Image (cartoon, rainbow, N blue to C red):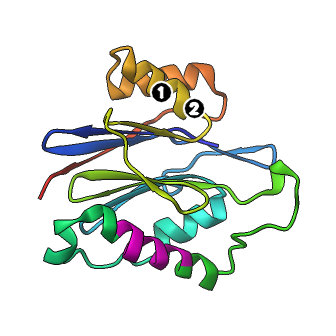
């Protein structure tokens, strides 16, 4: 899968992603195959179903962040961003509800989305979460990285620790930062 970490800071956030894509027994690395992008007021990053992630990163146009939206970004995520995401994925033909009971075949997409310096985590069921610890980790190496953050590691060291413990995580690591607006 991948490793992406997010750290909520007092005046913004940082999101760091790795560069390895492992799918169907193959490993892909290429500078154009990113897992995190900046788009206007957003940083969008994700792990899981790579086709779904491609749609989210390269085909989805996020809703405009209005003054009203800035007043309660959590509600904006729930009421505007998530429905927009789901509509884009559905329009692109991504199967959000796979019919198999096999856990290897179920839809899996986890996202870290920052808006104006605030991080939100979106799970495969499109639930929106926030964490008062300020640490976020998604993908197969996410737990390793979050554990390292809690132990005092910086973001790059946390990613290196995840890569040592998870063969689906590899450098180079890409850093995106966003200030609170």
Q: Position of residue 124 (x, y in %)?
A: 61, 57
Find the magenta span and give its range: 77-86
Which residue sits at x=35%, y=28%? 155
In this picture, residue 28 sits left or right of residue 64: right
Which residue sits at x=45%, y=28%? 146
Which residue sits at x=42%, y=24%? 158
Q: Which residue is mark 1?
A: 145
Q: From mark 1 to mark 2, how far is it between C-alphas?
A: 6 Å
Which mark, by number, is residue 141? 2
Which mark, by number, is residue 131? none
Q: In terms of depth relative to the viewer, which is nearer, 141 or 160?
A: 141
Magenta part, dominant SS? helix
Task: Specify whether residue 37 is painted magenta.
Answer: no
Answer whether labels 1 and 2 touch (C-beta < 8 Å). yes
**Above-or-below relation of 53 to 155:** below
Q: Which element is circle 1 on? A: helix
Q: Which element is circle 2 on? A: loop
- The image quadrant where one finds the C terminus is bottom left
- The image quadrant where one finds the N terminus is top right
Q: Quick one: label 1, few (<14), some, or many (20+) residues within 10 Å?
A: many
Q: In terms of depth relative to the viewer, which is nearer, 16 or 87?
A: 87
**Above-or-below relation of 150 to 128:** above
Q: Quick one: label 2, few (<14), some, or many (20+) residues within 10 Å?
A: many
In this picture, residue 168 sits left or right of residue 115: right
Q: Residue furthest bottom?
A: 91
Q: Position of residue 166 (x, y in %)?
A: 63, 26
Q: Position of residue 122 (x, y in %)?
A: 48, 56
Q: Position of residue 123 (x, y in %)?
A: 55, 54
């Amino acid at each position: 899968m991948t490793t992406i970490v997010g750290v909520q800071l007092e005046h913004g956030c940082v999101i760091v992603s790795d560069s390895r894509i492992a799918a169907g027994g193959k490993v892909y690395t290429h500078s154009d195959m990113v897992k995190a992008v900046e788009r206007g007021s957003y940083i969008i990053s994700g792990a899981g179903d790579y086709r779904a992630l491609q749609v989210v990163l390269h085909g989805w146009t996020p809703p405009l962040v209005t003054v009203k939206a800035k007043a309660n970004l959590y509600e904006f995520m729930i009421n505007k961003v998530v429905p927009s995401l789901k509509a884009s994925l559905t329009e692109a033909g991504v199967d959000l509800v796979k019919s198999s009971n096999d856990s290897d075949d179920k839809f899996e997409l986890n996202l870290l989305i920052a808006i104006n310096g605030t991080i939100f985590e979106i799970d495969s069921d499109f639930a929106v979460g926030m964490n008062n610890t300020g640490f976020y980790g998604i993908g197969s190496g996410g737990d390793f990285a979050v554990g390292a953050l809690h132990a005092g590691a910086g973001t790059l060291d946390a990613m290196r620790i995840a890569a040592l413990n998870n063969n689906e995580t590899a450098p180079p690591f890409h850093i995106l930062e966003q200030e609170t607006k």
